[in-house]
Amino acid sequence: MKLDILVIGAHPDDVELGCGGTIAKEVANGKKVGVIDLTRGELGTRGTAETRDEEAANSARILGVVVRENLAFSDGFFVNDRKHQLELIKMIRKYQPEIVICNAFDDRHIDHGKGSKLASDACFLSGLIKIETINDDGILQKQWRPKQVYHYIQWKNLEPDLVVDITGYIDTKMESVLAYKTQFYDELSKEPETPISSKNFTDSIIYRARDLGRLVGVEYAEGFTVERYVAVDSLFDLK
């Protein structure tokens, strides 16, 4: 199956928090979008790997993505080495996305920066013909390099290079985030508190999108950083 967009996250819920509105909008526009989670989030303070699996599946249905896979790398301890790069290269060649969206360059959680660099490196290496990978059927895969790699913004309020208007999709984004019932605010929960389990954090998802939207003249927006200059045919292509 060929995808238009492949979204990669170090943990289940990264992609929802970072670009859930963009995913929902592109799906509504007829694009085929898939998600790869690098880990099962097994080191998370709240919930378990099994609950995160279930929550990720529920969120995928809400967003309407056509596929979601988990590479089950070691949460907290995966590294950007040949072994991990080859596993991700196999996924990139399997789905041949035009665009890859991945973790923030720099963020509070160490896996986010590692996941960002791993995804970026794998996208480049995937285009090299002399790197050989075999698919699940034992067939040699063809090289593939996405046209663009974008990075969503996470805990740190990084300055975006471009923004996507997600007005009309903020409710879907929030529904996909809150599908992770063990992770976010629940006044009845007996689980330990974490930086993302407060009501303030849940509220911040909306007010950050609203503030970014305000800056570009729309109601809600999500921001992305880029690896190379954004090019347009005309100045009039910009909103």
Image (spheres, helix red, strand yellow):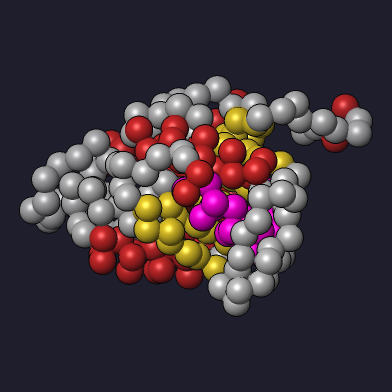
Q: Is residue 130 left or right of residue 113?
A: right
Q: Is residue 188 left or right of residue 24?
A: left
Viewer can see residue 137: yes
Question: Percent from the top left, x then y, of residue 82?
Answer: 50, 44
Viewer can see residue 177: no
Residue under the image location 73 percent in, 54 percent down: 143
Q: Is residue 210 magenta?
A: no
Question: Percent from the top left, x then y, of residue 233?
Answer: 91, 34
Furthest residue to the left? 190
Part of the protein shown in magenta: 84-99
Residue under the image location 67 percent in, 41 percent down: 124
Residue under the image location 61 percent in, 74 percent down: 138
State the image quarter where residue 160 is shown: top right
Q: Is residue 109 above or below residue 190?
A: above
Magenta portion: prevailing SS class: helix
Residue under the image location 28 percent in, 36 percent down: 200
Q: Nearer the viewer, residue 182 or 50?
A: 50
Q: Quadrant of the N terminus?
A: bottom right
Q: Is residue 100 left or right of residue 192?
A: right
Q: Nearer the viewer, residue 30 or 128?
A: 128
Question: Percent from the top left, x then y, of residue 46?
Answer: 19, 51
Question: Percent from the top left, x then y, of residue 168?
Answer: 59, 53
Q: Quadrant of the C terminus?
A: top right
